[in-house]
Amino acid sequence: MSGRRLTIVGGGWAGLAAAVAAADTGWQVTVLEAARHWGGRARRLTVRDADGAAWFLDNGQHLLIGAYTATLGLLRRLGVVPQACVQRLPLTLRTPQGDGVALPRWGAHLPAALAPLAVAVGLLGARGWTLRERLATLQVTLRWQRQGFACTPATTVADLCAPLPERVRRELFELLCVAALNTPPAQASGAVFLRVLHDALLGSTPPPYAASDLLVPRVDLGALLPDAAVAALRRRGARPLTGARAVALQHGDTDARWQVRLADGTTLSSDAVVLACPVWEAARLLAPLGADEDPIRRWCASARALTHLPIATVYLRPPPQWRWPATAPLLALRSDPASAPAQFVFWHRRMGAPSPYLAWVASAPEPALATDREALTRAVQAQARTQLGLAHTEPLLTVIEKRATFACTAGLQRPPATIAPGLMAAGDAIDGPYPATLEGAVRSGLAAAAALSAAFSV
């Protein structure tokens, strides 16, 4: 054991990843979570319907892919068997009418070097597209591959996709952009989009998954990672604390580099601190420490410069006799900001749920809907009627995360991971190769723990 003390502010996926990694290398870890639950913006919600039945839902629909090697590795490290917790299916973006792209199932058995073959077959077999549209799409994606899936920082996703036919842009790449970056293509970073596309189509991942596989959680998000992470931390002698809000951060005395003061008046002394809370909360804690033009002040400025966007999830229960119209548990939708706000719908048949239910996902809904749960629910119910033929649905819950993600725009300078000696930041908004995803959060947390261990020679 090193005896080094580490305080992690924030118990989301980034903070828990950092805590597990640090505890495994000998740090004495304390995790402070202001809320009464673990998981941050990817957590379990418990609600009861009109009959009093309990539903274990999520505060937002999340999806993993086979290329999420850090997340899958952390799950296995915690003793979670991914095959038991996620449903695997080939990359599929089909509409309720059956149009769109689906990669062949046999592509999952190909080595990474032959993965482009499955992509080519999927594109050439796209339903509802003309032969010219299919060939043009294959030509553009092959060009991206020859260019190493790289572009200039100022390039947007719209710039990248300009040579593509309009229907292909609308039915494939705009949906992929929304799913991965949660940012409109006209503003979204082409460089980050290509990085995700490269990893999803050509990346390598341990068996049994292919990098492009979609992994839909079979369990609630709390059961997927946070529950196991907290249990593992307790077994390792760490202190995971909920209801513990950090209100001040200051330089420590000679025995400790940093001190964190809690809302209840307690002060924790630490050799190092990881701020794995939302960036606006981290900036609030750091503001009193920053002098003009010093790194802390610059870090706060970059954090405050981020534009945050809402994501809404509307949970609806269909009638018992209704049947889901597809083999895959998700469908791509034709969306409209005002009348049809959801871009995707997921079909859930989770163990323990009173009955199957639908999760409708609306990324960055228009302001009038993003601030009115009832109006948003009505708009999604109308979308269910027109696109799935669902005349009647029972609303279970509508969740609107007002600052669910950040706008991953072209040329964006995100806050760096290193703030000061012994002081790191972690989270999906921190500078890194991925956008605001579970994988981005986990990678950031693991990287923060590794950097501190290297700096302190743990």
Image (cartoon, helix red, strand yellow):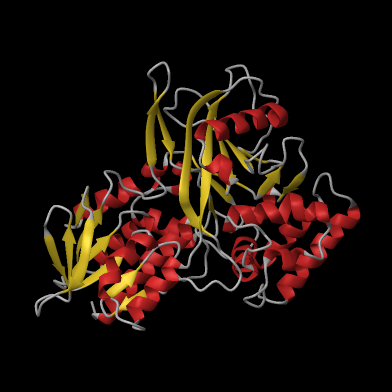
> Which residue is at 31% across, 45% downward?
227
Q: Nearer the viewer, residue 363 or 325?
A: 363
Where does residue 178 sit, x and y in percent of width and height? 62, 53
Residue 210 visible here: no
Quarter holding the N terminus is bottom left
Left or right of 241? Residue 178 is right
Q: Quadrant of residue 209?
A: bottom right
Residue 87 visible here: yes
Quarter holding the C terminus is bottom left
Vertical order, 30 against 49 (above or below): below
> Which residue is at 77% across, 69% downward?
142
> Which residue is at 66% across, 44% downward?
337
Q: Nearer the viewer, residue 201 or 396?
A: 396
Vertical order, 119 against 316 (above or below): below
Left or right of 197? Residue 282 is left
Q: Quadrant of residue 345?
A: top right
Where does residue 169 sit, x and y in percent of width and height? 76, 56
